[in-house]
Image (cartoon, rainbow, N blue to C red):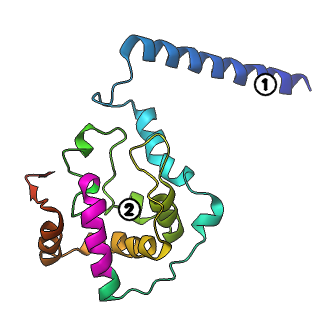
Amino acid sequence: MRTSKVLTFLILGLCLAAGLWMYWFVTAHGFSAREKPLRIEALLARNARRLASPRGARELKNPVGLTPVAIAEARDHFADHCAICHANDGGGRTQINAGLYPPAPDIRVTDTQGLSDGELFYIIKNGIRFTGMPGWGGEDEENWKLVLFIRHLPKITAKELELMKEVNGLEIHGGESH
């Protein structure tokens, strides 16, 4: 019993010390989105996506079949609604994204591609608090098609990028979308 009390006080003391340090840091340095975040901030931001979806959402399976038409419809929707932050190629190199923290992720890489279809669907539909990702709502079928397109992004073709540019006028120059 005595050991558990000591352990409880030790944990409470560490939490209090961490809280005081965070208070000091924020009041001394501010909380600007223009500064490079601390490692702990980056870690928390990366994990916010996984925390943003309830367990039941992770188990959802995409009911929309993978067809060229579904990909084309989602490509145009993505170009019109998502590329402003995520870029046509999904890399996130956009003018708007440069000022966001946490930035919109490169959705072609393992951190996003490793999420389940249900998690991606939930994030598209409901957003993620404390980030720039809004909850779009929308029709479920459109959101499931976007999940298909997100899965397609790592192998997007130059022709598809040209078609997206026709929708939104964005093109990639030297790592930044304009």
| Amino acid identity at mark 2 | Thr
Q: Which residue is mark 2?
A: 110
Q: Describe residue 138's horizontal placement relative to residue 102 as left or right.
A: right
Q: Describe residue 11's horizontal placement relative to residue 80 as left or right.
A: right
Residue 7 visible at all = yes
Q: Separation of disc 1 and disc 2 at Cα?
A: 38 Å
Crowd rating for badge 1 (residues with CA inside 10 Å; few <14, some 14–19, many 20+):
few
Q: Residue at x 61, y 70 (%)?
A: 59
Q: Which residue is mark 1?
A: 8
Q: Residue at x 50, y 44 (%)?
A: 129
Numbered-mark total: 2
Residue 52, given in percent of the width and then of the height, sits at 54, 51
Nearer to us in this view, 66 or 73: 73
Image mark for residue 127: none
User: Does residue 175 lie above or below 11 as drawn?
Assistant: below
Q: Which residues are magenta?
A: 71-85
Q: Residue at x 41, y 71 (%)?
A: 147
What secondary structure is found at the residue carrying circle 1? Answer: helix
Residue 177, given in percent of the width and then of the height, sits at 14, 53
Residue 48, given in percent of the width and then of the height, sits at 50, 47
